[in-house]
């Protein structure tokens, strides 16, 4: 099976590894796994397109950036996703995620 790669224009930013659980009562950041992966609950059904759209909107709100700066670069059809956040360093992204954990 051939992989499809999306090329980006090299803008700087940070990457976040996520484990997403659909059909939650509300959107929230649950915690961090031992490997640094961020556990996120999303209220949307597991339909990939709906879930991904709601996930991007939620993360943009948590991080305080426009939705256009948040992109799923790997894992569009699974629970494990790699998210790119343009123009935000890793430390800032980490601080904003931790501030929204339950």
Image (cartoon, rainbow, N blue to C red):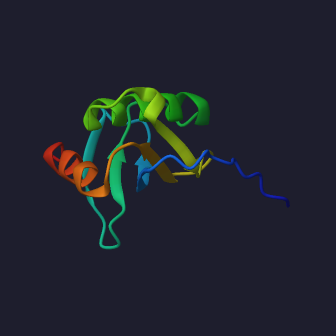
Q: Among all residues in the image, which is located at the extreme right?
A: 1
Q: Relative to the observer, which residue lies in front, 6 or 54?
A: 6
What is the x, y in percent for residue 66? 38, 26
Q: Name the residue located 38 percent from the left edge and 36 percent from the top edge.
A: 42
Q: Look at the image and tell me in which quarter the N terminus lies.
A: bottom right
Figure label count? 0
Residue at 84% x, 59% y: name it.
Answer: 2
Q: Is residue 57 left or right of residue 97?
A: right
Q: Position of residue 45 (x, y in %)?
A: 50, 31
Quarter of the figure with residue 50:
top right
User: Is residue 76 in sight in this rendering?
Assistant: yes
Q: Is residue 34 left or right of residue 66?
A: left
Q: Between residues 23 and 58, which one lies in front from this camera angle? A: 58
Residue at left offset 24%, top offset 54%: 94
Image position of 21 with respect to 37: above or below: above
Q: Residue furthest bottom?
A: 34
Query: Does residue 44 appear in this view?
Result: no
Q: Is residue 99 above or below residue 91?
A: above
- Residue 54 picture location, percent across and down: 44, 29
Between residues 8 and 2, which one lies in front from this camera angle? 8
The spot of residue 47 in percent (x, y) is 59, 33
């Amino acid at each position: 099976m051939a992989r499809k790669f999306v090329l980006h224009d090299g803008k700087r930013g940070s990457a976040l590894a996520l484990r997403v659980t659909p059909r939650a009562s509300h959107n929230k950041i649950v915690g961090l796994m031992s490997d640094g992966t961020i556990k996120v609950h999303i209220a949307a059904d597991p339909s990939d397109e709906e879930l991904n759209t709601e996930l991007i909107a939620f993360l943009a709100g948590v991080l305080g950036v426009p939705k256009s700066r948040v992109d799923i670069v790997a894992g569009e059809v699974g629970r494990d996703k790699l998210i790119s956040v343009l123009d935000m360093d890793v430390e800032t992204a980490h601080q904003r995620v931790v501030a929204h954990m339950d």
